Amino acid sequence: MIPSTLEYTKATSLDEALAAVKAGARPLAGGMSLMPMMRLRLAAPGAVVDLGGVPELVGICEDGDEIAVGAMTTHRSVANDPLIRQHCHVVAQAAAGVGSMTIRNRGTIGGSLAHADPHGDLPAAILAAGGAVIVRGSGGERRIDVGDLITSYLTTSLAEDELITQVRLPKGAGQSAYAKFHRRAIDWSIVGVGVSIGANGVRAAAIGVGDRPMRLSAFESVLNGGGSLDDAIAQAGEGLSPLGDLDGSTEYKLHLVGVLAGQAHAEASSR
Ligand SMILES: Cc1cc2nc3c(=O)[nH]c(=O)nc-3n(C[C@H](O)[C@H](O)[C@H](O)COP(=O)(O)OP(=O)(O)OC[C@H]3O[C@@H](n4cnc5c(N)ncnc54)[C@H](O)[C@@H]3O)c2cc1C
């Protein structure tokens, strides 16, 4: 199938992109999720604005105790960036495992968060690290913690005319790791878990177990309360009720959460 007719513009500045979005155009980042949805006619925007020519949206730099990552930065750049690898390893590791080389060359960190797929690896890794996004719209600029950004399946708290401009990653998440289970290297994760061990204790988040990335509260509280890793693993799935489907039953996915949380914690501890 081919997409329905639409108007295409390529913005060359952030102001131009924001004006187009305000006028009703759908932002187009790497196109790795939006284009397939358009081809299947699950999305049929009348206009799209390509963000690929907006210089303000690309790049990675240190800013105090955070790393500022432009929304249009590709998964490949995130995976290979020395700052992110050192200070927020869980995010670099998750980006390195996204889909195939082609997807990583085109797909962007901002697009992954805005798309809010409940199986997307980046949102879980950024939630585990305690990251946030900076968004701009006609109401000005605001910061949203990633835990408050994704509200449900393919749904975010972004207003219609808002763009994610930056992702902010904390520099205190170097001792962290991402573990996922999928059948073939190119497949989406059935379940993925990010764990970060920082000054405020352990943070963990999982995908594939709900309609959005979920914090593993029981796993965190056992470890932050001085309990053993075995107890934390046994309780990791508490409060979660993933739907059984062709990928596995509810029980199987809950089992995977514990196994992957244990793996990610062990790897994070050894870093
Ligand atoms: C075959 C295949 C395998 C994949 N495997 C994985 C995987 O294993 N793990 C994984 O995490 N992902 C996977 N993906 C998805 C991939 O990570 C995409 O890159 C990502 O979901 C969307 O990013 P994008 O830049 O391509 O965004 P686009 O497809 O361009 O946009 C996605 C959505 O976000 C909106 N949007 C984009 N940028 C912004 C912005 N700055 N502000 C506001 N809204 C915005 C768009 O309007 C659209 O609604 C896969 C995709 C494919 C096609």
Image: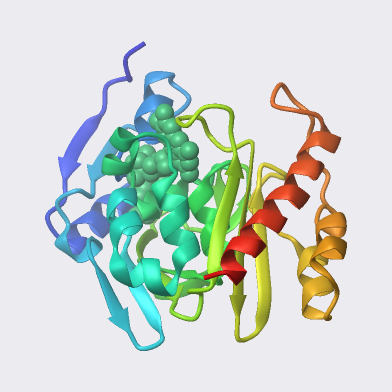
Residue 34 visible to the viewer:
yes
Q: Would you say residue 148 is visible in this rendering?
A: no
Residue 7 percent across, percent down from the top left? 22, 32
Foreground pick, 164 / 268: 268
What's the colour scheme? rainbow
Q: Quadrant of residue 171?
A: bottom left
Q: Quadrant of residue 215?
A: bottom right
Residue 4: image quadrant is: top left
Percent from the top left, x then y, of residue 40? Answer: 43, 19
Left or right of 182 on screen, residue 141: left
- Could you tell me residue 101's position as x and y percent? 31, 36
| Residue occupying image coordinates x 16% and y 51% | 11
Q: What residue do we see at 30% from left, 80% from top?
A: 62
The residue positioned 58% from the left and 38% from the top of the image is 189
Q: Which residue is pictured at 48% across the width and 53% down the height?
A: 122
- For the residue pair 245 and 177, the one nearer the viewer reads as 177
Q: Quadrant of the N terminus?
A: top left
Looking at the image, the residue that sits furthest to the front is 270
Residue 168 on image: x %, y % = 41, 72
Instruction: Answer with the quadrant where ligand 1 appears in the image.
Output: top left
How many numbered dots are placed on residues in this image?
Answer: 0
The residue most toward the top is: 1
Instruction: In the rendered view, tell whether residue 189 sits above or below residue 265.
Output: above
The residue nearer to you, when weighing 140 against 210, is: 210
